[in-house]
Image (cartoon, coloured by chain):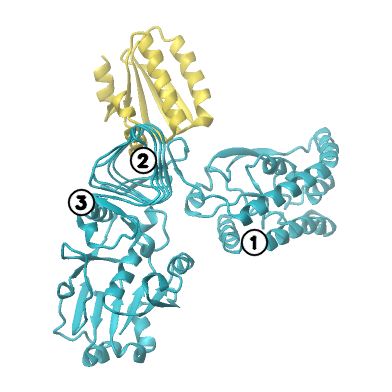
Chain colours: A yellow, B cyan
Amino acid sequence: MATAFEVKDGVGLVAMSGPLTAGQVDAFRAEFNEWHKGGEAFRNVVIDCQGIDFMDSSGLGALIALLKRVSERGGDLKLARLPKKVRMVFEITRAYKIFQICDTVEEALKACR
Amino acid sequence: MKAVLHTSGAPEWVRALGLETWALAPVVGRPLLEYWLELCDLLRIRDVRLVLGDGAHAVETYAQDGSRWGLKLTYSFLGPGEDPDRFLHRAPELWAEGLFYLGTPLFPRRLGTEPLTHATVTGTYLHMEGSRIGCLASVQPEFLQTFLAGGELALGAQGFGLLGITPDAIANLHDYFELNLRMVRGECARYVSPGYFSKDGAHVGYNVILPPSAHVQSPLVIGNHTRLGALTVIGPDVVLGEHCIVDRQSELTRCVILDGTYIGRNLEICDKIIAGRRLIDPADGTVAGIDDPWLLAKVSSSLRAMDVLRALLGWSLALLLALAQLVPFLLLAGLLKLTGQWRFLQAAFHTARQQKANLLVFPDTSNGQVSWLARLFRALSLDRFPALLQVLAGRLWLCGQEPLATPADDALRYELQDYFPAAFSYATPRTEASDAVIKRVDAYYYAHHRSLAENGRILVRALLGRLAALCAPSAGDAA
């Protein structure tokens, strides 16, 4: 699991790649929390999911935890470029009802501004 | 009149369902082959030859001698790459009196609204699939003589509609999905479904557990031995196979769930096919392998008596071996650490229970750079000690297949129907790591030859083979 964090146009942007499963979620959450703690310049976050090749219920749980954390700081979390297989997991777990999912990163960034 | 049904071949849509042959692809809970066997019975054909290829063992185990359908089944094999039609030309005299022939994967869709009664083949009926014969029935000697001699198909053949059926092709997952939904929306009443209770478009098998809080809406089909959790919502347009479990609060609409599937809690399945851990979108054929038993899983059949014996025996032997290895392992492992030769690596692998775990792996000793101490460590099978602990924890068998790594061997894991990861396998005596081909061959060989005697052979070969390798000169010595 590789993650890249940056701030673009005043919105936090996280690019993820690799599997997001039980084995990776703790490290990912710790990394995200560390980055988010110091991120005073932004409130909203976009996660670019294009590189995620598999996600299980633990990965989904981690994303929900991030959503809660961002929301508590008054921000919004949006997902962009969900691969088809990950989108199918979102469909069966009803997660698509919780997250706002955008087709492109630009669309998600625009929605956050 | 005799019938020849080709069961070989697994088009892409069949492989996506995790099956080896189209003949066993279930349509509303029953294999496609069964519809053809029933049709043979209705046409008063008793002698049926099943031509096997891929998935031969599974087909033979399922159909057996055919007495279940009042038929006499015999089996033949199709050579690799052999044209199914040419099989008939091997011994044409066998089929000269009348032939019912199925050459490609088709579904015998019945045209009437009522169950088909007996029909009689009086002429020649032909259904072509492109340039190939899909289905053929004939009792006309002149036609059969010309056809079996390899000649052109004579004109004048009629369509199968006159027999009350139309052979439907299944080209992809979308066709398969639509066929199942069409059946559940009313057509399955035309077929025999023994033991099913049918009312108002709902067809429910026997031994189905439906709690009072479950909401069931027809049309739907629920297979035998299926269990629904509390507050589940099933239907409309749902085909739920046999031995399925739907956990509480899940909602299923417009979907096909194959036999032996577990649907996790609070899920929403719509416009999908689910086959065990495979989540399939029939619209575009995307298959997602869900490696999470909280979401989807293959329901394991309960352990058979022999499996219980195997597990008990394996566990006891593993305990004995672990106890015998404990002191030597600690001593030699300590020495290896002191001399800087401790080379165990941690690798993730698929366990026997559809989960993943980490295993300490001792790298191969095929190169000549390995010290005498490391070779002794391996010769005494002390590198198996961590795996023995996994056996005691129930994550591995004592003898079986080489544990498949994740993600490197994920494809093979999804392909294998029978997976028995073990501390000792055919690969254990080898000094070099198995390549993908050897791994696949070993895994399939074990799946087909699994027995207590085979396990004994694996264990003895592994333990003695390694000791013998210690005495043989190493590559480094030879150099």
Q: Which mark is residue B210?
A: 2
Q: Is residue B104 above or below residue B244?
A: below
Q: Does residue B53 appear to the left or right of B330 in the view shown?
A: left
Chain letter for mark 3, please.
B
Query: What is the quadrant of the N terminus of chain B in the image?
Result: bottom left
Query: Mark 3 packing: few (<14 Cα in 10 Å), some, or many (20+)?
Result: some
Q: Position of residue A40 (x, y in %)?
A: 40, 6
**SS under mark 1:** loop
**Circles 3 and 2 on the same subunit:** yes
Q: Pointer 1: what residue?
A: B451
Q: Position of residue B23 (x, y in %)?
A: 36, 65
Q: Pointer 3: what residue?
A: B185
**Circles 1 and 2 on the same subunit:** yes
The image quadrant that residue B62 belongs to is bottom left
Q: Nearer the viewer, residue A99 or B266?
A: B266
Q: Is residue B81 visible?
A: no
Residue at horizontal 49%, vertical 67%? B57
